Image (spheres, helix red, strand yellow):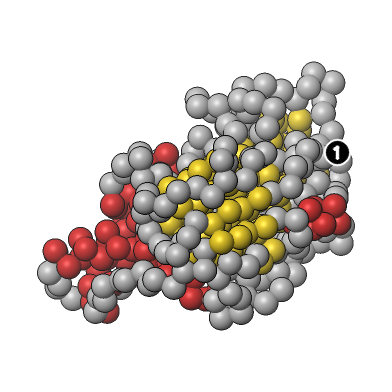
Amino acid sequence: MKNRLKIAVFSMAIIALQANEVEKPTPKVDSIDVAEYIKCYPAIKQIEMRDNWLKDHKMGEWQFTGDITAKDKTVVSPQVGTNYGYSWFNISKEPVVITMPKYDKYYSLSIFDMNHFIEVKVMPTKPVVIRLPHQKSPIEGAEEIVLQTYQGLAFSRQVIADNTKEVMKLAKEITIEGGGGDFPFVMPSFDKDVASAGVKKIAQWLRKHKDSSRFFVSPYEGGRYMDRAAGVMGGQLGIQSRYVQYGVIGHTNGKDSYEYTIPKDGLIRNDKGYWTFTIYNAKDHYLIPNKGNKYHISSYNAKANADGTYTIRINQEGKGDNALPTNGVEFYALFRVYEPVSDIKFPTLENISK
């Protein structure tokens, strides 16, 4: 698919990608200008993403990724087993109405304004109206999201659990109507030295502070400018920790064998949620190619143990139940939990080769 957007998650892999840029010395610049750049950084990255997307698409239309395999080299640390949908819109003329078809597995709609503030609707059963404060909803009884910017991004997620055809058929039923505005989003300009200094400060903050509950917020939750900038650098399109939390397993030797035992209870707070476990090549941050196209295990397709727990097996050949192959390469992993409990405790990876 043309011009897929890069999906970055808050992980050690993304931080590593910033290392070369961070260590470059930066000339002296006005601290006020740098502070202003940091404040504007989420909007700067939103504009970059929007303009890249508009090269091949129009405001108010949907683009869907379909399932992702190791052949896809445009997505860093991708979440396998999810169909992502993108639609940028402009509501300066009138509100936008989005409808999603009913689905028996996890799906959600995230709305990002141009400052990367987020509102999320999990498995909505009613139309979602996106409007400005002075606009009235065109639909009575709809779920409403009020933005403070004319433009924004609608970002949908649909779980794929060995049912790609069903999901892609349902994706065609996701609609977006209204909008049609053309008012711009005005962004100040910054010189290269200011931008470089700002990026360095954001990256330094990101390395020291990894509390994603502060990074991704709605306009009603506040949040520091630096925290929000760090969240965008570490994982643009990341959402609030009450909707998803990430368990990160750092760079690990791919020649050994491992087990990751997921408890029966204590991770997900309601029956809407699910978990998914994915491994990635530590060298290039992409999926590890393998003959069986096995890249992740989720609660939708995992085989449970007799006691209700689940054991993920990671080894060179991908042998065993719920197994993922490393092909012997160094890897890292992300364990994602949607609709997590507030005091989530992530399991630890056990090396069973020793």
Position of 269 with respect to 188 (left or right) is right
153 shown above or below 301: below
The image position of residue 181, as x and y in percent, is: 46, 69
Frontmost residue, 216 versus 329: 216
Q: Exactly how many numbered labels are in the figure? A: 1
Say which residue label 1 marks: 321
Q: Residue at x 50, y 56 (%)?
A: 95
Residue 189: x and y in percent read 26, 76
In the rendered image, the vertical position of residue 254 relative to residue 346, given as above or below: below
Q: Considering depth in this image, is 249 or 210 the residue closer to the camera?
A: 210
Towards the viewer: 23 or 353: 23
Q: Specify the quadrant of the image occupied by residue 71.
A: bottom right
Q: Amino acid at mark 1?
A: Asp
* Position in image of residue 135 (x %, y %): 42, 52
* Vertical relation: 327 (above or below) 273: below
Q: Quadrant of the N terminus?
A: bottom right
Q: Residue at x 30, y 63 (%)?
A: 40
| Image vertical order of residue 29 relative to residue 276, above or below | below
Residue beneath the point at 18% across and 76% down? 27
Secondary structure of the residue carrying tag 1 is loop
Which of these two is toward me, 92 or 33? Answer: 92
Looking at the image, residue 294 sits to the left or right of residue 120; the answer is right
**Residue 33 on image: x %, y %:** 17, 68
Answer yes or no: is residue 264 visible: yes
Quadrant showing the C terminus: top right
Image point (68%, 44%), residue name: 107
Residue 63's quadrant in the figure? Answer: bottom right
